[in-house]
Amino acid sequence: MQLFNCDVQSIFPHTFSANFVCFAVFDNFFVSLSGYMKERSSIAVIGLSVHTAPVEMREKLAVAEELWPRAISELTNLNHIEEAAVLSTCNRMEIYVVALSWNRGIREVVDWMSKKSGIPASELRDHLFMLRDSDATRHLFEVSAGLDSLVLGEGQILAQVKQVVRSGQNSGGLGKNIDRMFKDAITAGKRVRCETNISSGAVSVSSAAVELALMKLPKSECLSARMLLIGAGKMGKLVIKHLIAKGCKKVVVVNRSVERVDAIREEMKDIEIVYRPLTEMYEAAADADVVFTSTASETPLFTQEHAEALPPISDAMGGVRLFIDISVPRNVSACVSDVGHARVYNVDDLKEVVEANKEDRMRKAMEAQTIITQELKRFEAWRDSLETVPTIKKLRSYADRIRASELEKCLQKIGEDALTKKMKRSIEELSTGIVNKLLHGPLQHLRCDGSDSRTLDETLENMHALNRMFSLDTEKAIIEQKIKAKVEKAQN
């Protein structure tokens, strides 16, 4: 068996016979070197969002924040995936990867998504978007800036992008490229919000939910409607904030623990907050005209049976109890709307609210693209400059081997007894100095900060020229190293 036209045993001399069975897992992975040399490792994003897939599909693919490290581990265990990150919110589920091979990597990720969700890959592909390299990076920067959100310019997504980085740092899951890309995306998101005011006057998912509820209530009764919030997390807290802004004076909050509700009550003095434990959720719903749900429950809290058991709403409130569900997975089953005195609205129903002030924010989004392009160039220059690092190391190692070999020959000819320690040290320093001076020029031409595209192009040309002149085989060595790491990870 050969790997890149070289003996596998030479790469794994100590584990070859005992672990040969491990290589069977990588039958599709061990191809000719030329097959991989044709393409550089690709950054890719594979995902779906509120723009491409209904909530019914998004909730099946949703990954809770505490499970992100596990998902990253599973993804990086795939044959052709080096690095990975998961961004899962109520409006999107996106997987960012660095893939050894674009086609093979994409296929593996789609298969992983299919297996996780139970949705056939053929059905998934109708709703997935797939972007590569600069397009993938630009997409993340736009997401972080709020340009791809259901509510253009909303701020919560930036906090969620930051959480991806924090989660990755805590678990050690993010690789060098993905980590830098997400950090640069955070910078882009901050700049867009500071320099364009795109978020001024923009609504969040939570505020859009409040707007939608008030739109559906009789205008004369809006402020007297009995409001119930289930879930006192970040989204729920924002719901209360926007209810206050609309003039509501009282809200009942159902939550697993009272501590979080007490903290919100302490912060928000302009509204009466009544706490009810989770065990009293249905009793609280019976006394509510509008029920906002925002929990991490994996199963619906309200089904058709639950809704039918609730008492009817007064005619003054329109005779219909409103369920505004901003959770993914959904907290309220769609069939609740089949009950005559109930209506369900989920995150996909917020579009009619956000269309109202979209035109003004679209103008600001055009300004934001200039900032996105600047940050994108910085990231791509950084990533391109990484290509020269292996060549620098290889060239230095090549020169040091020659120096050490020639130095040993010299010392043998002179004879050990003929030299003092000081003389030996002086000869060694001489040889090192000569090598350093000879390498100074070539190494200078392999270094660039990426700020000048012309210099970067020249640097990459120099890198390829040095690889040819000194037969460094850097690209081959990198691929072999990556595959060796993959095999060793599978063995462990």
Image (cartoon, rainbow, N blue to C red):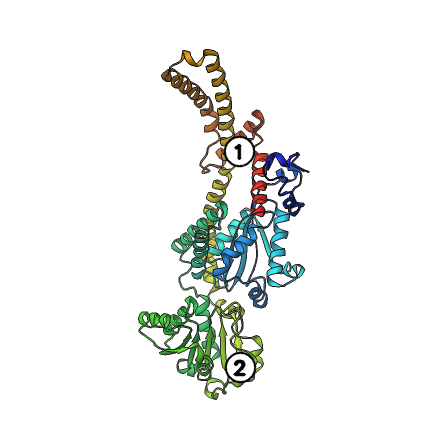
Q: Is residue 480 left or right of residue 66?
A: right
Image depth: mark 2 or mark 1 in front: 2
Which secondary structure, mark 1? helix
Quadrant where the N terminus sits is top right
The Cα–Cα distance between marks 2 and 1, rounded to whole angstroms, is 65 Å
Three-letter amino acid code at the position of disc 1: Leu
Residue 490 — which label? none
How many numbered marks are there?
2
Label 1 Cα neighbours within 10 Å, binned few <14 / some 14-19 / many ≥20: some
Which of 275 and 342 lies nearest the eye of the viewer? 275
Q: Where 288 falls versus 172 (above or below)?
A: below
Label 2 Cα neighbours within 10 Å, binned few <14 / some 14-19 / many ≥20: some
Which secondary structure, mark 2? helix
Residue 86: image location, x then y, percent: 52, 56
- What residue sits right under mark 1 in the picture? 460
Residue 148 seen in the current view: no
Q: Residue at 48% of width from left, 57% of height from top?
A: 147
- What residue sits right under mark 2 in the picture? 306
